Each structure stands twice: as structure tokens, then as C-alpha cells.
Amino acid sequence: MRTTTPNSPHIRGRWRQLGSAAAATAALLVAGFGTAAHASAADATATATHKVSTKAIAVQVAKAHVQYEKAGCGATPKKGFAACDALRVTGGTTAFMEKQAALKGIAPKTVKPNAASDSPTGYGPSDIQSAYGLTSAASSNGSGETVAIVDAYDDPNAEADLATYRSYYGLSDCTTDNGCFTKVSQTGSTTSLPSADSGWAGEESLDLDMVSATCPNCNILLVEAKSASDANLGTAVNEAVKLGAKFVSNSYGGSESSSDTTYDTSYYKHAGVAITASAGDEGYGAEYPAASRYVTAVGGTALKTSSNSRGWTESVWKTSSTEGTGSGCSAYDAKPTWQTDASCSKRMIADVSAVADPATGVSVYDSYGSDGTGWNTYGGTSASSPLIASVYALAGTPGSSDYPAEYPYAAAGTSALNDVTSGNNGTCSTSYYCTAKSGYDGPTGWGTPEGLDAFTG
């Protein structure tokens, strides 16, 4: 039970693909979008004089279409190393931009490749909280909980960029000085940090911003491994747990190997700790550590506004046959006792899911290196993993003997999860491995959060 309270990166695939929050107005806030603190008189006037139905907004949002590239930490890794699962939008029009344009009755702007933006072009905290039924919990829960982010290499601007993101959205300060933010190496040192890396810095900004968006009251621990090797990343996970984090997000992965079962017990087996891992960004196929039976494997969706009662709709994220959320039956890892799908005798990926499509991507602020162009929109299952880790944190500290990957299975088929029933991430011999359906499926697991009930014991 739980009580409340460098450059050897990793992934497979192509660099360029086709695949939201900005300053909003007081009128948008009434409609459930944006942040009143950033309203402008011009935006308020435009919105007030242009009436638009939710159905019309949804139609416009469906036009979202972007170009993106793998973050610099996402190149195919050598054996024994991992890559990040982050994708950075370089051009086109995101779902968030389409929504804002529809509300104002104007033509949508476009993202300019490799150019700094003076305001966000992706979904922000109010969007994420609204989509997943977290608005009330995000306001009142999370104090005293620590979400750990594990990545490789150092982001020298991590704290400053986090401050910019949180200030823009009106979130409370999260700094070293007030004890909310801590950055350490895999050995726990706050001074002897790894070498800096621009690609991983973008990943780290994405992760930190997703924790802030989902659980604004949570403390954040950033643990930086000295390289992207499986062993160093695993050591960083152990350090995060040693330092007291009960929620650990891992936005990286790589090919499975026969060593995975050893890594399981050495690095990812931590009772009483909710550990999440990205399912991957290359479409159908399993990767590790998402395949570990001790983690919550997190798939990815396309998240769009809708005229339905929820106000949002989701489908499996797939851009092409090689770009989309990962899923599949592990070749090596044993099936956990709580997983009961019929055709996979070993560990099945994924368990749950959240937004990952770059076209419906999230807002991130990153200022370090070649990827650090200011406000960016990111996608990939690197967005969904820290989001789900933060949902666990909102739900409260896990029971000391629990493996929280089991929690969503107890809520399977209930209103605590949004069942994703459309889309696929490729072709496979067993349909549910790669195709969404009612109930459990590989690409989205049991679905996406609708509040906290599926993430508590």
C-alpha cells in the first residue's frame, strides 16, 4: 500500500521527420487554455471578438504538421550504450499553435528551423494537467516528494533554464537555494560533474520541464551519468534512489541484450520506488530499460483537443514506419506477475502512455549549445516518461515493498485510465503488439492518466 502525502548516445532511426504553452489570455484561461499571467491586451481583444466552437478548434488542431529531428543525444548507440528518446521540432505548425490561431481567428504561425522563439510553441502545464485530469492534484499535491531525472552528461544551464520555464508559466521557484532543485553526478557529487553535452542538455531540459508542468510542487533531483553507457546510467539510477527519490524517470533506451536481466537486479529493482522508462521512438520494437519488469514502460500518444466531454482525444503516436512509440514483447525479460496478456510469454511493452507526438508536442526552454535555441517544442517518449513519473509523485509515496509498475494494472479497464483505441506503430504478427484496441495493447498499454487512481497502491 502507499501513503499520500560524449557522446555515445542511443536510439535508432532517421534524423528528419514529419511528425504546445504560449502566453495566453485571460479569455483563454476561462476557456481552459493558457495562463492569465501572460495575457496581452491584443490577444484578449482578438479572442473576445472571435467566437469559435470546440469542434472548429479540434478541426484546426488536426492540421498540425511539423518537421523535427532527433536531439543530439539520439543517434544510434554502440552496444552497451543508450540514446535519449527526444525529438525537437524544427519547422511546421504544432497542435498548440493551431489551437491558438483558431481561438484568435488568425492564420497559424510556423516554427522557424533552428531559430529562437520568444514564446512557447508547444503544450504547457495547463494543457497537460487538463488533458490528464490533474489540475486539482497539481495545485495541492506533491509537496515533499522528489522526482529524479536520470540522464547522461552535464547541462550547465539546467537550473537557469528551469527557472525561465517556471517563471514564464507562473510556477513557484525551484532552485538550489530553496532546496527544490538538486543536480549531482552519478556519485552524488554536486561539484565534480560530467562533461557538458548539448544534445543531452536538451533532453534534460525536456525532463525537468515535464516534471514542473505535471507536479509543480515536487522537488527535482537531476542525476547526471558520466556517459551514456548502460552501466553508468544504471549507477545514476541507484544514486537517485540512494538520495531518497521515490520516483525516477529514464528517458533513454537501446537494443535489448542478454545482459538485461543482470541490469534489472543491479540497477532497476527498487521496491518502494516508481521507476519509469521511455518505450522508444522508432515504432514497433522493444528496447531496454523499458523492457525491465521493474519499471513502468511508457508509450506515446498524439494528443489533440476535442469537442468530446474530456476535451481531448488521443491515438497511438506514429509518424512513419520507423518513427513512433515503441512497443513489443521482450526477448529476454521475464513477465511480471501482474501482466496477463495472452500471447507474450515474457515482458510486454508498454504499461501506460502519454503525449509524445512532436506535432502535438510540449514546450521546453533550453539555452545550452547547438540545440539550445530558447523556446522549443519537443516530442518523443522522453516527454511521456517524466510526465508519468510525476503523476506517480502526485499520487503519493509508494508502499515500501511495492513495485509501482503494478499499480495501473489494478485500475485496468476503469475510468482512471483513458483507453486509447485507435492507431498503430507499425506491423506485427500479433495485432495487439502494435495496434491499439479496447483494453490492453502494446503501444499505449492500458491507456493514459485520468487523475491519480491508477497510480496508487
Image (spheres, rainbow, N blue to C red):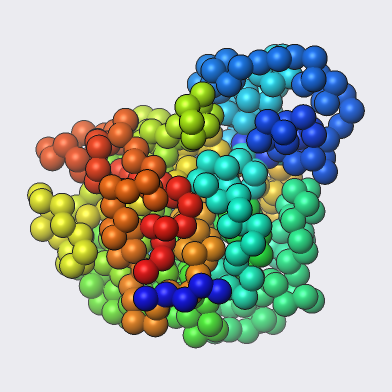
Residue 99 in the image: x percent, y percent?
63, 25
Which picture quadrant has residue 427? Answer: top left
Residue 70 appears in the rendering: no
Q: Residue furthest right?
A: 41
Residue 203 in the image: x percent, y percent?
57, 55
* Residue under the image location 64 percent in, 47 percent down: 125
In the figure, 443 relative to 40: above or below?
Answer: below
Which picture quadrant has residue 23? Answer: top right
Answer left or right for 275 relative to 218.
Answer: left
In the figure, 204 relative to 448: above or below?
Answer: below
Residue 451 in the image: x percent, y percent?
48, 52
* Residue under the image location 82 percent in, 25 percent down: 43
In the figure, 195 relative to 419: above or below?
Answer: below
Residue 179 appears in the rendering: yes
Which picture quadrant has residue 161? Answer: bottom right
Q: Classify the position of the C terminus by image quarter.
A: bottom left
* Residue under the image location 15 percent in, 52 percent down: 341
* Residue under the image location 51 percent in, 72 percent down: 4
